[in-house]
Amino acid sequence: MSDQPVTASGLPHLAQGMASPSCADSSLGQAAGTDGILSSLIRVGAIATDSKKKWYMFDGPVDAVWIENMNTVLDDNKKLCLSSGEIIKLTEAMTMMFEVQDLAVASPATVSRCGMVYLEPSILGLKPFTECWLKKIPDVVKPFSEQLESLFDKFLEESITYVRRSVKEIIASTDFNLTMSLLKLLDCFFQPFIPIEGMKRMPQEKIDRIDELIEPWFIFALIWSVGATGDANSRVAFSTWLKTTMSAKEMTLLFPDEGLVYDYQLDDAGISNIEEEEDEDVVSEVRWVSWIDSSVEFTMVPDSSFCDIIVPTMNTIQMAYLLEMLLANHKPVLCVGPTGTGKTLTIADKLLKNLPLEFISHFLVFSARTSANQTQDLIDSKLDKRRKGVFGPPLGRYFIFFIDDLNMPALETYGAQPPIELLRQWMDHNGWYDRKQIGTFKKLVDINFVCAMGPPGGGRNAVTPRLTRHFNYLSFTEMEDSSKKKIFSTILGNWMAGCPAVEHLNEALVDATIVVYSTITSQLLPTPAKSHYTFNLRDLSKVFQGMLMAEPGKITDKLPLLRLWYHETCRVFRDRLVNEEDRTWFDDLMKIMMSEWEIDFDEVVPFQPLLYGDFMMPGADVKLYELIEDEDKGDAGEALSSTNLVIELPGPSEATDEQPWPFLEPPPKKVKRKMKHLEKVHSLSHLLKGLMSVIEEYMEEYNQINTTKMKLVLFMDALEHVCRITRILRQALGNALLLGVGGSGRQSLTKLASHIADYECFQIELSKNYGMSEWREDIKKIMLKAGLQSSPITFLFTDTQVYKQHCWRLAAHSKRLEGTVPMRKGREKGGRAALSSSPYRIGTCPSSAWNEQQSDSQLNLIKSESFLEDINNLLNSGDIPNLYALDEQDQIMTTMKPIVQDQGLQPTKANLMAAFTGRVRSNIHTVLCMSPIGEVFRARLRQFPSLVNCCTIDWFDQWPAEALQSVASSFFQDIPDPEATPEVIEGMIQMCVEIHQSVAHKCKDYLAELGRHNYVTPKSYLELLSIFTTLIGKKKQELKVAKTRMKSGLDKLLRTAEDVAKMQEELELARPLLAEAAKDTLVTMEQIEVDTAVAEETRNDVQAEEMKAKVKAQTAQSIADDAQKDLAEALPALDAALASLRNLNKNDVTEVPVTVPLGSSIIFVVWCQQHTRRHVLMGSDVWIYMTSTL
């Protein structure tokens, strides 16, 4: 069809729009109120005025959710209904097409709306691929097209049929993929003969000899394409089949009879090398040569780090050659193989050191949490804009992106992997959609991908064949024992050159280690309870890495060498075992291995535990990694005499003439064993004291430096873990995974070990507002410090780092259930407060008996699983994508430039960042503290495989009785004035131990009977001791108060008795005076009686007078009442008179004399309340006088 389709390829899982809720970014989809990719393209097509046909291709896996939302579009009305309520009507020229792998989750409603076209691979066949390819081969090879076609007919389909029938593939392949891989390899062989303008041309003499190479080119390409996907056993079968087939078909150049076809590479006699001039007199022949013959003899660089040592083997040489050939010709490569087979190391070495300068590499690590957005953002951030819609590296450069753990991204609900679909979109369409400018397609040029992954299973998922079909497979098979022996014999032999007395044991020691590793990997298999029993070649290499830490000059004979080897083997394999049964099995295996050297196991291991360290001489300039033993142990006789133990010797009756022991001959074997046992007890006792004193010295120094004090009880189990952690921190790329329940001491011992190693210990501090930005800032700070300043840092991370508020809520809820006060209140009042996870810390802690469901939800809480993804990247590659800003990148480049130049490398950006990343990995020692309880831990190991693959595991077991006794003894020593005999205190200690151990046994019975878990941890024991000591203190305080009160009462009684006695003495002295006073009293009483009679008479008289006074008073009162009554009657008249008086005027006054007859009188009487003023007018005179009112 001539019309150009509008491709929305990968939309369901890459567009991040409304069609893919499972991986949608809400800022891009319709849910956020903006157009997604599909709606943008549909909107443009709906308003178009032309009548051209428009195809909308959905290229990706089907999602049951978004495909149902397309039903209205697929109906006859063809309407796109958006979540905003808008409806877009599609025109008749717009058609939807879906290109999917299957319809496993599509509903019948969707299927019925679409026409189906199913392409059967078997019907298509392989002919179309080879025929199309033959039409496009270079002109210089076209004369040989018939020969190539004949080879295809002879070998291609027959070889693929054999692979499908008889080969066990590491990763599933398709016939088309194997065919295309073969054709790509042939293209790589043809490339040197293609003339390039401005470049030197291939000489004609060499072009004339191409016919000699056509057949071997094809066979070589067939081996490393069709035959490259099988495991080690399948390679043997395929090699046999190919040799037989080549002989039957009378091929010209046959393989030698020795070895496999994989063991040989093609020596083309320099025909394909433009630079190599051919000698006219000597004509080399094309032949098969061994890969090893062409390798350069390996020599180790002195003082090189163990992690930087790469010993070339046949497998690594093969893979490096094929990698360079494919990547140099811009072919995508997928390396597949089990963990520890060298995939990452081989690829990184090739990308950083052995490719032309035009190639610039970038590294990515996928995990279960990796999203399509993260992948797209990382790749986009590395590219520059070439022109509109086209992005790529700087001109003249070519980017290669290395993606490790390709198949780790988690599956969506309907089985898709968004990051995988993003890569597939680039493979199919050379780009992807811009997430900022919705609907804009970005074309990415001059980039390529090389990927690595393990076989599916154990958290790794099967990758869709729609992506893997684009890659050439390179299969890293399990390393053969011969290759292992060569690698480690070379490394160990270089170290043993410093101890020539035992140099002859090199190969025997390597063989024994390989046997131990093979036995463990086949016998100790992972189970749900032992999910970390996953061993790989990294573990095998750690044994020799540990041995290389010792000073070879100290190894004088076989015994110390085997002792060192036993110790390192235990540290790598035994320390991760979870129960005594597995440890006993491992010990028996080691005894068998010791017997191979005809040496007694007790001679190699004189005492248990066998510990090595480099810290026994604090402040030493040169720290030697050596056996920790008693330096003052003296001879055996002194040892026995100092033990105060008695050997029960046989009596004289047991002596015979043949053996008159104990007087003349050596003691019998039974007594020898007892003597050996006593020597071990004595040596171990002195070892414990010496080691403990050194560790206590370090702890005291730690407390002087740090504000947070550390008070630990150091018993043998704790000392063992300190030695193990310091050993891990001392190693290059030394990271630890400490597995144990809460309170087992993982954090405290790590801090102490970091101080012993003189490392800075960094631990994040979670708070309510702690998020990804704060996490990235913290992790960036330590990475810059480790990379730029080369400062060794211990990064301590635990799975119980949660919000303090969340812990308070859990504690408050627990306290409410118990009917006690909330934790917050208890903390403020100095009540029971949870300390750090140290098992030996003197303090109190909350209850630690929990069921499995609680442990999953409470103990395995991490602020964000994204933290673990970054830690996974840090462990695997030493880098976290998109972490540094531009100014920080410039600072890194400036700092690392002289360092890279000193190494003799070009200061390219890739080399500078690789050097910085290497220093980060070397200086940051990550210590992860996790609880192995529950499904959460198992899920994390599946999702983030570096937690096991890149870490040395140390299992914190239950505390032994000796540890329980030591902790209890320390608790009881801190009780002030215990007022108890040593026997009583010892009895209390034994009782606490018995309580804890009996509950642990009952928990096992509980699990056996009810099938439910209940865990009793060191925190439980600490709380038992805490409650006991608190109760003792409380009772002692109560007794003290009662004693004080009783003493106070007795003191008062004594003082009262003394006062009474004193008063009695005074009373005796005053007795005569009392008698005389009594006589005077009698006289006084008689006089009082006389006076009383007189007083009675006087009283009677007074009463009579009183009666008279009362009568007079009553009379006076009656008079007063009458007067008052009269006054009340007169007052109104007075008031009226006064009113009239006030109304008088002058005229009224002058008329009075006329009207009044001569001689008459007018009297005005005025009454007042207190006084009466009387006015008497007689004639012309007026008399005024006052009278008192009654």
Image (spheres, grey):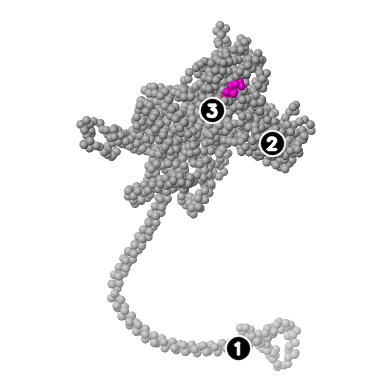
Name the N-terminal-most of marks 1 and 3. Answer: 3
Q: Nearer the viewer, mark 1 or mark 3?
A: 3
Residue toward you, 1137 or 893: 893
Name the N-terminal-most of marks 3 and 2. Answer: 2
Q: Is residue 564 visible?
A: no
x%, y% of residue 562? 38, 28
- Of the residues shown, which amino acid type is indicated by label 2? Val
**Residue position marked by numbered label 2 in the rendering:** 111
Alpha carbon separation for disc pair 1 and 3: 138 Å
Task: Count the marks.
Answer: 3
Give residue 327's quadrant in the image: top right
289 versus 1142 height, above or below: above
Q: Nearer the viewer, mark 1 or mark 2?
A: 2
Question: For residue 1174, which numbered disc appears in the image?
Answer: none
Dot 2 lies on which element?
helix
- Of the residues shown, which amino acid type is indicated by label 3? Gly
Q: Please report the bounds of the magenta region as a residue range.
A: 156-163
Residue toward you, 128 or 41: 128
Quarter of the rendering occupied by the N terminus = top right
**Residue position marked by numbered label 3 in the rendering:** 337
Seen in the image, is 134 located left or right of residue 783? right
Name the N-terminal-most of marks 1 and 2. Answer: 2
Residue toward you, 606 or 240: 240
- Of the residues shown, which amino acid type is indicated by label 1? Asp
Q: Nearer the viewer, mark 3 or mark 2?
A: 2
**Proximity of marks 1 and 3: CB atoms separated by less than 8 Å:** no
Give residue 778's quadrant in the image: top right
**Proximity of marks 3 and 2: CB atoms separated by less than 8 Å:** no
Instruction: Residue at 33% x, 35% y: name it.
Output: 680
x%, y% of residue 916? 53, 29
